[in-house]
Amino acid sequence: MVKINVLAFVLVISNCFGQENYTTTNSKIREAKIYSNGGMLKQSFSAEVVPGKNFIIVNEFGRNRGIEISSFKPDKKITLIKYESYSNNPTLYADKLGKNKKTELLNDSIEVYRKINKDFDQELLLTRNSIGIIQKNQALGNPSSTEIIKMIEFNKATLKNLYLEEQTLQAKIAVNQAKISALEGKRYSSTRNDETKNNNIIVLQVNSDKKQTVNFEVNQYIQEANWRPFYIIKSNGIKSPLKISYKAKIQQNTGLEFKNIPIKLINGSFSAEERPYDLQRWFLRTERDQYVSNLVYQKPKVKSNPREKNIEEVVLLGESNKIAQRTMKTEISLDKNVILPSDVEVTEDLNDFEVTTTYKYISTPKLDNKTFLLASIKDYSKYNFLPGDADIFMEDLQIGTVNIDTNQLTSEMLISLGSDPNVLTKRELVNKETKDLGENGKFESYSYEITVKNNKSAAIVLEMKDQIPVSTAENIKIEAINPDNANYDKSSGFLTWNFEIKPNETKKIKFGFNVTLPKDLITLDIK
């Protein structure tokens, strides 16, 4: 008797640990962090497990998983075996999830209407056969007038009813077919929804030595997620502050809807490992001046965007490796009412504020006759701006898009509000002279005139820039002539004028330079 009881106990234990247990649960997002590229989801779910092998079917887990089995953190002692996407083996897990009741109801309704239409089709066939029989047996041999009248009356009564019945059956079949088509459309949508839903399901395999409730925490890396700052900047004139709308364009492709959860936006790319850079040995590199056809050394030209012209210095003496500066990341918490659907880019408002602003006009007529209006924002770091594009509006008229550059070492940020066609500039080379100095070489003199006209109804402050060339050799002497009260930096050759110009006023600025150089050298690109 004891042996039988022991054997029964062994069988019970064997059955408990030998059977596979399937349980279904739903994952819940606790927090979402979206970086400029990539992101992280914190999720959690609970499941009842029994002794032996357990398959935990986790709904609403999301796509783009990119996680290891070690990322699942249980709060109880179990053995994690593996996880896989439900869509990898749908036939194995379909019965465990249960059939879609909505789809089953749609299938039942479609079958009912198809059965009714089958009966209607049979009735329609009989009706059409009856019409055919009557039409084939209308001929009479030498009929009397009475027989003809009877035949006519029969046709009117019988055929008329048969034709009416035919039309009625056709109409009923058409109505039912329309209902079937509508139901099939709903079934198709339901099936597609099931497919989408199945893509968000994983199956986690675990072993447990006892029956228990296990809580899981998961940090899930999101590959397909990103956000970028975006601004709308409005100005109502140079006497009013800037109105700035700070926005974020956000996208995530997890297959889940982010709703009623903490969502944080973080600048920079997500990286599981961030370390500071190490300096390497710096070997000084130099270049020889390049002379072509015995001409003065010229800096190689670089193709650039015509909208991004800058006055540059003449000489580049060496090169060095650049070390990128890393800054601490900025974190922005969204309102909990924000909803982020999957696979759709959305724009969310972050902040709206007015910024006390000073305005100034800047012109470099050597490069372009346009005069640009710039807005200066002092202590801009307190607004937590990040680099991004901005739509610029002047007096409710969109004038273009600029890039907000926050990587500046000064406390002032300049934002270009576009060119003002009411401030005109013109630069001309008005005089050029060349003299022979004999064995000492030759002498060249250049004179310029810049004309500025303010067609606006208000006075403006204008900063205008030009330049004097910089010598690259001891035997080439350059002297600035009559810089007309400019701030002249001899090391760079830059000339800067700051002055006020009244409404409808025209100003003329004159300057020039002299060059003494050997006879066998020719100056280039002076205009």
Image (cartoon, rainbow, N blue to C red):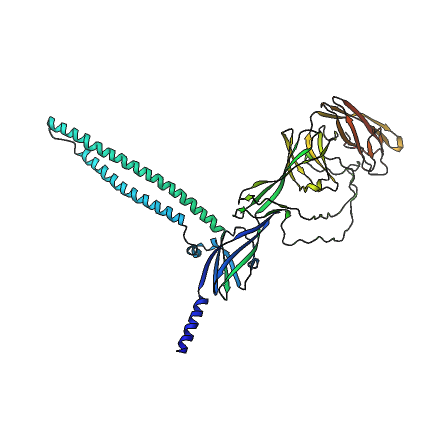
Residue 306 appears anywhere in the view: no
Please give left or right for residue 385 compared with residue 467 in the image. left
Q: Residue at x 49, y 66 (%)?
A: 210
Q: In this view, does 77 lie above or below 260?
A: below
Quarter of the image where one finds residue 445: top right
Extreme top residue here? 504
Please give left or right for residue 504 compared with residue 345 in the image. right
In the foreground, 270 or 102: 102
Please give left or right for residue 145 compared with residue 356 in the image. left
x, y percentage for residue 128?
Answer: 23, 37
x, y percentage for residue 517?
Answer: 85, 34
Residue 115 appears anywhere in the view: yes
Q: Is residue 220 above or below residue 81?
A: above
Quarter occupied by the N terminus: bottom left
Q: Is residue 313 above or below residue 11?
A: above
Q: Which residue is drawn at 53% across and 64% down?
A: 79
Quarter occupied by the C terminus: top right
Q: Is residue 336 above or below residue 515?
A: below
In the foreground, 446 or 71: 71
x, y percentage for residue 59?
Answer: 49, 53
x, y percentage for residue 225?
Answer: 58, 47
